[in-house]
Image (cartoon, helix red, strand yellow):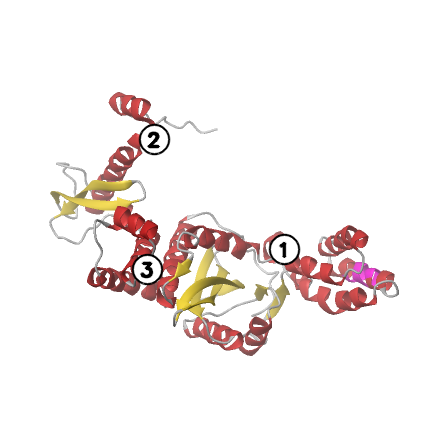
Amino acid sequence: MAHQENFTLPTQLLESIASEGLGYLPELIRILVNAAMKAEREAYLGAGLYERSDERRGYANGYKTKTVTSRLGKITFDVPQVRDGKFYPSALEKGLRSERALHLTMAEMYVQGVSTRKVKAVIEQLCGASVSSTQVSRAAAQLDEVLEAWRNSPLGEIVYVYLDARYEKVRIDGQVRDVAVLIAVGVDKQGKRRILGVSVSLSEQEVHWRTFLQSLRQRGLQGVRLVISDDHGGLSAARRAVFGSTLWQRCQFHLQQNAQAYVPRKEMAAGVAAEIRAIFNAPDRVTADALLERMVAKYENDAPKLAKWLEENIPQGLTVFGFPEAHRRKIRTANLLERVNQEIRRRTRVVRIFPNEASCLRLVSAVLMEIDENWQVGRKYLRFEDGGLPSP
């Protein structure tokens, strides 16, 4: 194993942490972020403070304080400046978008008069002593500009596309309604995961899905070899209309759950589930088809509805056998999107009911943009070798 140097915190800092515990966390964050911003400025300038270097691209110009309101309270940072005025540290900006979106959403609830005294207290703690509609509108416009640019950014070649929908409660015309949040995730030809897009609407399911998928095409989505999703009615119709010639993999996890609705007796459930898993885990398509044929014949008399359902639906989950074996486990279900949905759910449950569709789209977009940025700098999700993929 390669030797790694140990990072040692200053003795005074360690003593402060030991004496104050978690109460010292805001100060620790301030120190670490300040150090990260200072290092980022040195990288931007190509030289350290007072350092002579032929690679220097500018000069430091002191610091400006900036107070940020976080869930840990207000933290004041020393933001490094440069003379050309073009530098701003990503160490401070990154990670605050979803926090800012949450604040704005809750602030809108207060401004529009639909909040409780408890929500008002939380807003005052997070956003300041008072919040006006003008302040909210100005801040929302700035954030929306960044998020809209991200939602409309070019896509390019994406090998695998995962599609799913979740629902959030939104107040519309005085009534609380469930609006659909459509999400598309992909894996590009470099093997990196990408958040491809998001849309929020109360419109008819098929129309919403078709408009959303067409928008992905308009942004340059191409080269798709496989679409992975569940068999939702509106989604299926829209997928056939927009990606008609593209292969489809129906999520095996949901298929196995759907099968239970056709099991006539409770004591049969475990056996049916095990037989379906054996089909999905077969080494190749020929073996999977043989196991399916045998299973259909087994239940043809005792459970004819189950047998018919298996024969018509299970093949939709076997498309994955036409793809590289190393990829199959990660493209046979929509579990990648489920993990994304869990992170969205963690953030949106704080709000519970959004005051309008725009605030819902704002918070979900901010969360997804952060996830996408983390994926871009993270490790590859899949590795692509020459050959083994059907033509787009």
Q: Quadrant of residue 114?
A: bottom left
Q: Percent from the top left, x then y, of residue 238?
A: 55, 75
Give the side of residue 294 with respect to residue 314, left or right.
Answer: right
Q: Give the CA separation, mark 1 to mark 2.
A: 44 Å
User: What residue is shown with label 2?
Assistant: 22
* First in residue order: circle 1 vs circle 2: 2
Q: Which dot marks residue 109?
A: 3
Magenta region: 289-295
Q: Which residue is mark 1?
A: 328
Q: Answer whether residue 109 is magenta in the image.
A: no
Q: Residue at x 26, y 49 (%)?
A: 124
Could you say where residue 129 lies in the image, as x and y percent from the top left? Answer: 21, 49
Which residue type does callout 3 highlight?
A: Met
Residue at mark 1 to residue at mark 3: CA–CA distance:
45 Å
Q: Secondary structure at mark 2?
A: helix
Q: Residue at x 42, y 55 (%)?
A: 348
